[in-house]
Amino acid sequence: MHQLCKEHGIEFIITGITKSEGTEATLKEFEKMGIKTMNIAVDLSLIKYNNMPYDSHPNKLTHKIWAEKVLEVVGG
């Protein structure tokens, strides 16, 4: 995917969406490959960022924050 984006002038960024050692380690491996990364995580244990009491998935506020963080980097 990275190569295909590069060939077509598309910026390719891998984002981490959780705060964990595994996410950070994964992002570092992609950085070693020359792929741009960023961690856009928020604290999903906070009710303002999830869909509790129904489920713990990110809610629309979290998706808005994620999009804004990415747009800051890509200039949107």
Image (cartoon, rainbow, N blue to C red):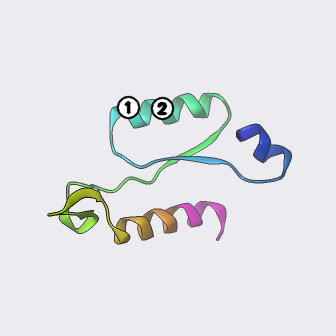
Pick the residue in front: 43 or 57: 57
Q: Is residue 42 above or below residue 4?
A: below
Task: Write the residue at 33% across / 44% down.
Answer: 19
Q: Is residue 6 above or below residue 63?
A: above
The alpha-carbon separation of the residues under discs 2 and 1 comes to 6 Å
Name the residue beneath numbered marker 1: 22
Dominant secondary structure of the residues highlighted in magenta in the image? helix
Task: Write the residue at 61% across / 28% down.
Answer: 32
Q: Is residue 2 above or below residue 48?
A: above
Based on the picture, tell me whether residue 75 belongs to the magenta stretch: yes
Task: Write the residue at 45% across / 62% down.
Answer: 66
User: In the image, what residue type sits under mark 2?
Assistant: Thr
User: In the image, what residue type sits under mark 1?
Assistant: Gly
34 horizontally vs 64: left or right = right
In the rendered image, the residue lying farthest to the right is 7
Q: Quadrant of residue 3?
A: top right
Residue 57 bears which disc, if any? none
Q: Position of residue 5 (x, y in %)?
A: 76, 47
Q: Quadrant of residue 73?
A: bottom right
Name the residue beneath numbered marker 2: 26
In the rendered image, the residue lying farthest to the left is 53
Q: Position of residue 44 (x, y in %)?
A: 26, 55
| Bounds of the magenta segment | 70-76
Q: Secondary structure at mark 2?
A: helix
Pick the residue in front: 71 or 47: 47
The quadrant of the image that shows the C terminus is bottom right
Q: State yes or no: discs 2 and 1 in contact (Cβ < 8 Å).
A: yes
